[in-house]
Image (spheres, rainbow, N blue to C red):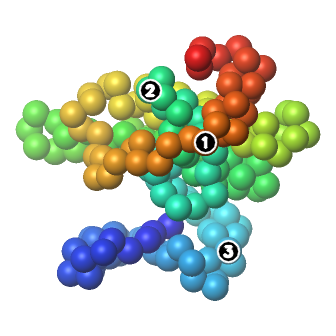
């Protein structure tokens, strides 16, 4: 899934880089986006979604490094709907300048509470915890080009997160 950056020249460079190899870009907001995503799953393809970002897509407020962070729910939603496994990965520069890619199988997810918002919260929270673990491997290599905590949670969002943390036995205060 992709979105455009404001500078068209930079956007084109990013697009060209991403299209090298066997990648199909699925632009956010395209009328055919959902069909392309479902076809990706039917072909047993890999759908890459960056969820460590504060973007303007359906999101939930879940802890990330001890603070509530607006986090997209797309991974949780697709995982529950399709049964597709969720993978995490790191790409770490090695001392010789090469890169080592490691892929982590985080498993499949399903509804546990029968309340969609609770399931989305539980899964998104769990994914944020796994992403934190990956970042802690070598924090300076976390490619982060935006303000992760750009938006602030409303009182209602904070109350929901606190309720969920208490339900899940978390430590959000």
Residue 109: name its quadrant.
top right
Question: Which numbered disc, 2 or 1, marks the residue that appears first in the sequence?
Answer: 2
Q: Position of residue 84 (x, y in %)?
A: 70, 51
Q: Residue furthest bottom?
A: 31
CA–CA distance between discs 2 and 3?
31 Å
Using the image, determine if residue 65 lies above or below residue 33. Answer: above
Identity of the residue furthest to the right in this view: 114
- Kind of element beneath mark 3: helix
Q: Position of residue 148 (x, y in %)?
A: 39, 44
Residue 75 as seen in the image, left or right of residue 26: right
The mark found on residue 65 in the picture is: 2
Q: Report, in whole angstroms, how far the alpha carbon at label 2 lies from the one at label 1.
A: 19 Å
Q: Which residue is mark 1?
A: 154
- Circle 2 SS class: loop
Q: Earlier in the sequence, mark 2 or mark 3?
A: 3
Gap in Å between the C-alphas at discs 1 and 3?
30 Å
Res. 157 in view:
yes
Q: Quadrant of residue 110?
A: top right
Which label number is shown at residue 34? 3
- At a point 41% along the width and 48% down the height, the residue shown is 150
Q: Provide residue 126's location: percent of width, then percent of height.
A: 61, 31
């Amino acid at each position: 899934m992709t979105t455009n950056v404001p500078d068209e020249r930079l956007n084109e460079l990013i697009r060209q880089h991403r299209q090298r190899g066997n990648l199909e870009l699925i632009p956010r907001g395209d009328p055919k986006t959902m069909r392309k995503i479902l076809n990706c799953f039917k072909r047993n393809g890999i759908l890459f979604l960056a969820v460590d970002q504060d973007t303007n897509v359906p999101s939930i407020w879940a802890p990330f490094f001890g603070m509530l962070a607006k986090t997209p729910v797309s991974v949780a939603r697709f995982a529950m709907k399709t049964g597709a496994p969720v993978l995490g990965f790191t790409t770490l520069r090695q001392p010789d300048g090469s890169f080592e890619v490691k892929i982590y199988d985080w498993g499949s997810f399903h509804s546990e509470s029968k309340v969609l918002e609770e399931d989305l919260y539980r899964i998104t929270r769990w994914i944020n915890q796994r992403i934190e673990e990956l970042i802690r491997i070598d924090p300076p290599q976390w490619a982060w080009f935006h303000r992760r905590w750009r938006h602030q949670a409303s009182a209602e969002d904070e109350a929901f997160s606190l309720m969920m943390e208490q339900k899940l036995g978390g430590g959000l205060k």
